[in-house]
Image (cartoon, rainbow, N blue to C red):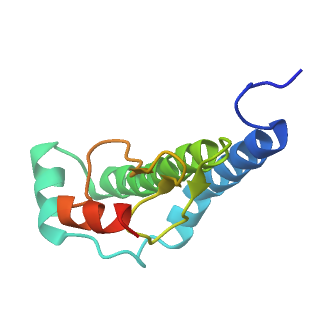
């Protein structure tokens, strides 16, 4: 018996494995590549002063914040992969105007954890492709 009736166990396991693999490596990657990302110096200064933190505490919190951001991004891709595995739906991948499409029902979807960044004009263009 399948874990979920609407996608295959293989698709579910693949999406979960990818999410776990990225999440497991996120903290170490954040530590190793800490200076690779541009850090807003004003934000850092005011966070240290406003939260009464020392520099070492700030670095630790920033490393964790960067790792969490990586994990949160991967959760969005996880949702997209799961929904794109539903029969009749297509996962358009990363970097497209929308995330998912169901051609039979003329539906497109942009998957977001927090808010929509796709403009109405772009959405209409994608629908009529």
Side (left or right) of 41 relative to 92: left
**32 or 79, nearer to the observer:** 79
Q: Is residue 95 above or below residue 7?
A: below
**Residue 80 position within the rendered picture, expressed as x and y whole percent measured from the top left:** 54, 49
User: Residue, x 37% and y 74% (percent of image)?
Assistant: 37
**121 or 61, nearer to the observer:** 121
**Residue 16 position within the rendered picture, expressed as x and y whole percent measured from the top left:** 70, 42
User: Residue, x 67% and y 46% (percent of image)?
Assistant: 85
**Residue 3 position within the rendered picture, expressed as x and y whole percent measured from the top left:** 79, 24
Side (left or right) of 63 relative to 44: right
Q: Residue furthest right?
A: 1
Q: Residue furthest top?
A: 1
**102 or 45, nearer to the observer:** 102
**Residue 29 position within the rendered picture, expressed as x and y whole percent measured from the top left:** 58, 65
Side (left or right) of 110 relative to 105: left
Which quadrant of the view contains residue 6?
Answer: top right
Q: Is residue 11 above or below residue 120?
A: above
- The mark tally for this picture is 0
Q: Quadrant of the N terminus?
A: top right
Q: Quadrant of the C terminus?
A: bottom left
């Amino acid at each position: 018996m399948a874990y979920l009736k609407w996608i295959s166990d293989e698709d579910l396991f693949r999406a979960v494995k990818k999410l776990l693999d990225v999440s497991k490596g996120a903290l170490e990657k954040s530590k190793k590549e800490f200076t690779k990302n541009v850090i807003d110096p004003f934000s850092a200064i005011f966070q240290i002063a406003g939260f009464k933190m020392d520099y070492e505490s700030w670095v630790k919190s920033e490393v964790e914040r960067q790792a969490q951001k990586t994990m949160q991004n991967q959760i969005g891709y996880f949702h997209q992969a799961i929904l794109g595995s539903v029969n009749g739906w297509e996962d358009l991948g990363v970097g497209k105007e929308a995330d998912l499409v169901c051609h039979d029902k003329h539906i497109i979807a942009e998957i977001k954890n927090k808010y929509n960044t796709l403009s109405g004009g772009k959405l209409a263009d994608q629908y009529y492709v």
